[in-house]
Image: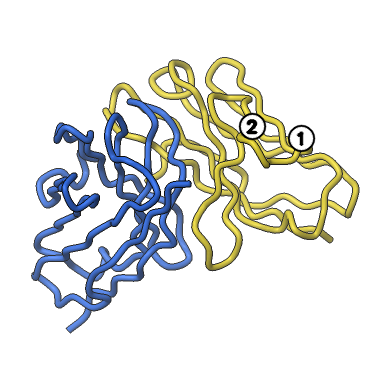
Chain colours: A blue, B yellow
Amino acid sequence: QVQLQESGPGLVKPSETLSLTCTVSGGSMNNYYWSWIRQPPGKGLEWIGYIYYSGTTNYNPSLKSRVLISVDRSKNHFSLVMTSVTAADTAIYFCARVPGMWDWFDPWGQGILVTVSS
Amino acid sequence: QSVLTQPPSASGTPGQSVTISCSGSSSNIGLNGVNWYQQLPRTAPKLLIYSNNQRPSGVPDRFSGSKSGTSASLAISGLQSDDEADYYCVTWDDSLSAYVFGTGTKVTVL
């Protein structure tokens, strides 16, 4: 069964760029959407955006100006880049698979805590 | 700010039933399917219900979902201590062109 694993730095300085990768194992990336979701410590969930396996993207309007999601099917992974981070971007970042446009998130990666601090 | 409203908490004794509501609008729940997630402490959310009332394989039939108009509900019957968790609803919002999550409900088993 497909599994997802997030990786990247756990600490990013304010105003710098956050970069994370989600590696997909046990299945193909083809014909699926791949999403990023985040959760500030002790708070609720927020959708960041998704990318179709072919490269088409859709972002949360509230983050669109600072976010870029890309896919590398040859490496079976997709990535998140978020620029100009602040303390408000401190969160657990999850990646997840989406079967079709507007569908559910399943499965999820275990999540990675990213702290924005100097 | 969450677009979908859930009660902050719900509780029951073992064996009882609990229902969690998720209130939205005509641009989200009124148009699209609702999905429900269970999040145990320090773990990733787990899919409980998709497309309003469908259970993935492996999810006990104690969990059920429904939708009416611009609101959805998750019902848990035969409450167990393992059900203590946070529960979130989520759907697509056509006006925002984004997925929107509920505010989350903490279920406590007394």
Identify the residue shown where x is 53% and y is 68%. B42
* Label 2: chain letter: B
Please name the residue that numbered disc 2 is placed on.
B55
The answer to whether tags 2 and 1 share a subunit is yes
Q: Name the subunit of mark 1.
A: B
SS for dot 2: loop
As drawn, A27 above or below A12: above
Q: Earlier in the sequence, mark 2 or mark 1?
A: 2
Q: Is residue A70 left or right of residue B64?
A: left
- Amino acid type of the residue that numbered disc 2 sits on in the rendered structure: Arg
User: Looking at the image, which residue is at 45% across and 60% down?
Assistant: A43
> Foreground residue, A57 or A77?
A77
Residue A41: percent from left, percent from top: 42, 68
Element assignment for label 1: loop
Q: Which mark is residue A88?
A: none
Amino acid found under the numbered disc labelled 1: Asp
Residue shown at 29% from the left, 68% from the top: A90
- Residue A32 horizontal side relative to residue B86, left or right: left
Q: Quadrant of the C terminus of chain B?
A: bottom right
What residue did someone put label 1 on?
B61
From the top left corner, tell me how far across and down residue A69 is, in percent.
16, 47
- Crowding at label 2, few (<14), some or many (≥20) Cα neighbours within 10 Å? some
Q: Position of residue A67 (x, y in %)?
A: 14, 50
Please determine whether, in this image, residue B63 is positioned above or below residue A80. above
Label 1 environment density (alpha carbons within 10 Å; few <14, some 14–19, many ≥20): few
Marks 2/1 in contact by CB < 8 Å: the verdict is: yes
Q: Is residue A14 left or right of residue A30?
A: left
**Marks 2 and 1, how far apart at CA:** 8 Å
View extreme (right): residue: B15
On the image, which quarter does residue A27 sit in? top left
User: Toward the viewer: A98 or A92?
Assistant: A98
Residue name at image x 46 percent, y 42 percent: A106
